[in-house]
Image: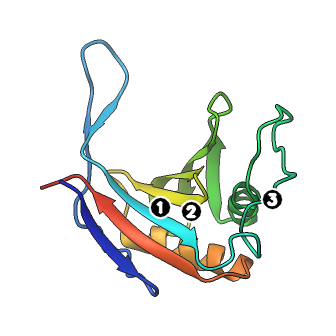
Amino acid sequence: MTHRMMARDPSFAIPSRPERTYPRSGGVEYEGETVFELAPDGDANEGAGRDEDADRDGDGDEHTDLASLVETVLADGPYRFGDFHELPMALYLVRDEGTTDVFRVAVRDGTVRLHVLPETDSAGLRRFYDRLDDRSAVEWRVECHTDFE
């Protein structure tokens, strides 16, 4: 089941958290998902929208200004982060050093997605959103998607 909440001034209240499991085969998996999807409102070509000429990794694929915006917000801190270079989209594991919140940030299909992890609290998500909003010239539409019942 997917629950959706939408807000212009979001609280980032987390309705449910994923549960971390460790399969016998190794690695880590998460049961359940809560994602806050941030989408630029209005003309997607202004402020934080698509840049038809952008090619972030030189592979000929079209990328968006959103990836650059996210990278700038992360680089300005107070974040410690790492990206996953082998993926076809921008994906970061992020730790807010101010709140100690840990979450994933993905840029996909013209949106910035904040993936809640078991350690994530609303404060870290809110601070990231505020910094993203301060750095962009667009209004943001925020939706929360969860697959918990």
Where is mark 2, residue-wise? Answer: 97
User: Is the residue under label 2 in contact with that under label 1 (CB below 8 Å)?
Assistant: yes
**Residue type for callout 2:** Glu
Residue type highlighted by circle 1: Thr
Toward the top, the furthest residue is: 25
Of residues 17 and 136, which is closer to you in this image? 136
Residue 57 placement, left or right of 132? right
Q: Which mark is residue 51?
A: 3
Task: Look at the numbered disc 1 and give the secondary structure of its residue.
Answer: loop
Q: Residues within 10 Å of mark 3 (few under 14, many from 20)?
A: some
Q: Residues within 10 Å of mark 1 (few under 14, many from 20)?
A: some
Q: Is residue 44 left or right of residue 41?
A: right
Name which residue lies at 80% across and 59% down: 51
Query: Disc 1 marks which residue?
Result: 100
Q: Amino acid at mark 3?
A: Asp
CA separation in Å, label 1 and label 3: 33 Å
- Name which quarter of the figure residue 83 lies in: top right
Task: Tell me: residue 109, above or below residue 36.
Answer: above
Q: Position of residue 93 (x, y in %)?
A: 54, 46
